[in-house]
Amino acid sequence: MIWAVALALATVIAAGTYLALSRDLLRCLIGLALVGNGINLLVFCSGRLLSQMPPFVAAGAQQLAVAANPVPQALVLTAIVISFIFLCFSLVLAVRLLQLA
């Protein structure tokens, strides 16, 4: 299972790098989006690969040993928002560049 996930992540990041190095502006932006999503998946999968119980603990209960780590989830959520904002800004910049050229 871990090798399949690692191979899929390597494929996504390699495809994104290939597209980001392209001379076409749209392919470059799609490549940057793929690299960002691949890195987000890498950070998310480094937390845990198997499905675990959510990190919620009831009041008065002991902390669960098999609970998912919420830190990678919070980091990935923040990174998704930042990469989406960066992609939107890049698209607006590309459209403006094409209008001026």
Image (spheres, grey):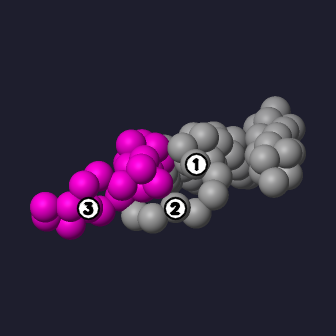
Q: Which residues are magenta?
A: 55-77
Callout 1 amino acid? Arg
Q: Nearer the viewer, mark 1 or mark 3?
A: 3
Q: Which mark is residue 48?
A: 1
Task: Check whether the beta carbons of the residues at disc 1 and disc 3 lie within 8 A of each other.
Answer: no
Density class for disc 3 (Cα within 10 Å; few <14, some 14-19, many ≥20) is few
Q: Quadrant of residue 68?
A: bottom left
Relative side of 67 to 24, left or right: left
Residue at (25, 55) in percent of width and height: 62
User: Which residue type carries mark 3?
Assistant: Val
Q: Which residue is mark 2?
A: 52
Image-based side of 49 in relation to 58, left or right: right
63 or 20: which is nearer to us? 63
- Element type at marker 1? loop
The dot on residue 87 is none
Reply above or below: 22 against 67: above
The reply to whether the C-beta atoms of the residues labelled 1 and 2 are less than 8 Å apart is yes
Q: Is residue 74 magenta?
A: yes
| Residue type (three-letter) at the residue carrying disc 2 | Gln
- Asked whether disc 2 touches disc 3, contact meaning CB atoms under 8 Å apart, the reply is no
Q: Quadrant of the C terminus?
A: top right
Kind of element beneath mark 3: loop
Instruction: Decide if residue 42 is in sight here.
Output: yes
Residue appearing at x 13%, y 64% in the figure: 59
